[in-house]
Amino acid sequence: MPLYAYRCGADGPVDVMRPMGAAPAVVPCPTCGADAAKMITAPRLALADRGKVAAIDRAEASRTEPAVVSAPPPRPVGPSRPLDPRTAALPRP
Ligand SMILES: [Zn+2]
């Protein structure tokens, strides 16, 4: 739930939590009861989860700057799957 900033003319800033998009233009000041007007503030991105922000940045960068691959990924190490007996008669490269 986002935190909206309001300002009372007498008491200063007032923070109010409301559902997204449900913040009115004016709320009553909790101290004096006068109208506190909504302020336009910068998003508080510093409070976001760093891992999620990094993932979003990587996803957005991959749109215009995809990672360049110079070789196929290495083959997995370990026992290989047994061949399907139905394909054993097919020619091998
Ligand atoms: Zn006030």
Image (tube, grey):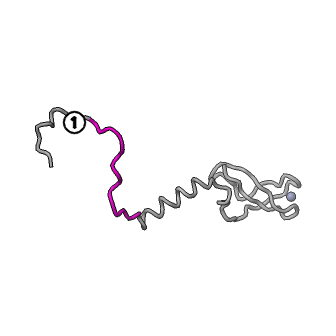
Location of residue 69 by image quarter: bottom left
Tell me residue 82's x, y (percent).
Answer: 25, 34
Residue found at x 88% / y 63%: 10
Residue farthest bottom in this picture: 64
Assess disc 1: are there few (<14), some (14-19) or many (≥20) residues with their C-alpha within 10 Å of its C-alpha: few
- 69 and 40: which is toward the camera: 69
Question: Ligand 1 is found in which quarter of the picture?
Answer: bottom right
Q: Residue furthest top?
A: 85
Q: Is residue 22 left or right of residue 71?
A: right
Q: Position of residue 29 (x, y in %)?
A: 83, 55
Q: In the drawing, does residue 72 fall left or right of residue 92?
A: right
Give the prevailing secondary structure in the magenta stretch. Answer: loop
Question: Which residue is labeled 1 in the image?
Answer: 83
The residue at the point 74 percent across, 58 percent down is 26
- Whether disc 1's CB lies below 8 Å from ligand 1 is answered no
Image coordinates of residue 91 in percent, x first then y, are 11, 44
Residue 55 x/y as whole percent: 53, 56
* Residue 60 counted in the magenta span: no
In the image, what residue type sits under mark 1?
Answer: Leu
Q: Secondary structure at mark 1?
A: loop
Q: Is 76 covered by the magenta stretch?
A: yes
Q: Nearer the viewer, residue 17 or 46?
A: 46
Residue 37, quarter of the rendered image: bottom right
Residue range (magenta): 67-81
Rendering quarter of residue 40: bottom right
Q: Residue at x 85, y 54 (%)?
A: 33
- Across the whole image, how many numbered discs are drawn on residues? 1
Q: Is residue 46 left or right of residue 57?
A: right
